Image (cartoon, grey):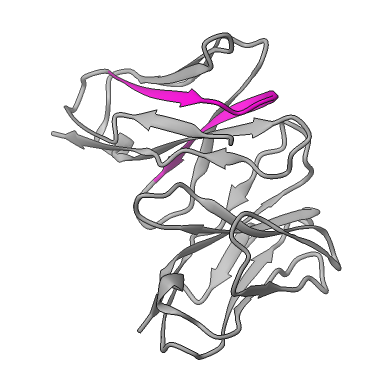
């Protein structure tokens, strides 16, 4: 069964600090992996997409990494801001499937 | 406004009643999806549609009915609501199913079944 596990479940950091969120998956065959940001009371919004051949991709202060061999991805947030407070969801698509597998998300709270 | 909208945003109903959640997108995307989001679970796919008049089941379709007579609309109906269907429902759309096609999500409908 395809699964996506995220850690930690929740995280509290101070404004200006860095943090790293983890995603492990067992989806096979692998097609791509997306990180979404979901603000409270809103729908998820895509931050970045990683394909098999990509190791690192940045989107502003967000940097995603992918290790397809170990089936792990991480999302690194640099110099956190209060607006980074949200749930971050890892989503993995398998080849030929319309149905992505969603992780449960990591809830990030940034305190001033 | 362009984009994807859902209505109502909040709904309280009683067990056994029929409820319809609406989803409308202005991009003419071919694909549309309905998800539910519950504490302790990731988003779970209920139904999806590849085009008008083409729908298919997702992971958790029991108790739900969908239709898609027009490309821009994808209503979700709970024929006889149960308490276990209390959840936040998200509609999404995408232009295609290539790996680079992003799913764009609506703002969600919070449904409470008493």
When the figure is inspected, residue A24 is found, relative to residue B1, above or below; the finding is: above
Asked if residue A37 can be seen in this view, the reply is yes
Asked whether, in this view, residue B29 is left or right of residue B84, the answer is right
The quarter of the image holding the N terminus of chain B is bottom right
Q: Give B9 or B49, whichever is nearer the viewer.
A: B49
When the figure is inspected, residue A88 is found, relative to residue A57, above or below; the finding is: below
Which residue: 60% across, 84% down?
B79
- Magenta stretch: dominant SS? strand
The magenta region covers A19-38
When the figure is inspected, residue B69 is found, relative to residue A102, above or below; the finding is: below
Residue B105 is situated, as x and y percent measured from the top left of the image, at 57, 52
- The magenta stretch spans residue A23: yes
When the figure is inspected, residue B80 is found, relative to residue B61, above or below; the finding is: below
Which residue: 21% across, 19% down?
A17
Residue A26 is situated, as x and y percent measured from the top left of the image, at 55, 26
Which image quadrant for residue A13? top left
Which residue: 58% across, 34% down?
A2
Which image quadrant for residue B101? top right
Asked whether, in this view, residue B80 is left or right of residue B15, the answer is right
Residue A99 is situated, as x and y percent measured from the top left of the image, at 67, 44
Asked whether, in this view, residue A76 is left or right of residue A50, the answer is left
The quarter of the image holding the C terminus of chain B is bottom left
Asked if residue A62 can be seen in this view, the reply is no
Give the residue at the far front of this rendering. A1
Residue B111 is situated, as x and y percent measured from the top left of the image, at 43, 74
Q: Give A29 or B107, whichever is nearer the viewer.
A: A29
- The magenta stretch spans residue B94: no
């Amino acid at each position: 069964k395809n699964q996506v596990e995220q850690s930690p479940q929740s995280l509290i950091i101070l404004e200006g600090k860095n943090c790293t969120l983890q995603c492990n998956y067992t989806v096979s065959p692998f097609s791509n992996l997306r990180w979404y940001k979901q603000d409270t009371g809103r729908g998820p919004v895509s931050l970045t997409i990683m394909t098999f051949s990509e190791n690192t991709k940045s989107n502003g202060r967000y940097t995603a990494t992918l290790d397809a061999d170990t089936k792990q991805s991480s999302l690194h947030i640099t110099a956190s801001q209060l607006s980074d407070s949200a749930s971050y969801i890892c989503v993995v698509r398998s080849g030929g499937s319309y149905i992505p597998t969603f992780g449960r998300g990591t809830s990030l709270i940034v305190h001033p | 406004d362009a984009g994807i909208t859902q209505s109502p945003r909040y709904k309280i109903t009683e067990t056994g009643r029929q409820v319809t959640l609406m989803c409308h997108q202005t991009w003419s995307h071919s694909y549309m999806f309905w998800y539910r989001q519950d504490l302790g679970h990731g988003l779970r796919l209920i139904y999806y549609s590849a085009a008008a008049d083409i729908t298919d089941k997702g992971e958790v379709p029991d108790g739900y009915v969908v239709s898609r007579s027009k490309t821009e609309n994808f209503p979700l109906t709970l024929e006889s609501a149960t308490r276990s269907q209390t959840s936040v429902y998200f509609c999404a759309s995408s232009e295609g199913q290539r790996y680079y096609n992003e799913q764009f999500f609506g703002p969600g409908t919070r449904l409470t079944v008493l």
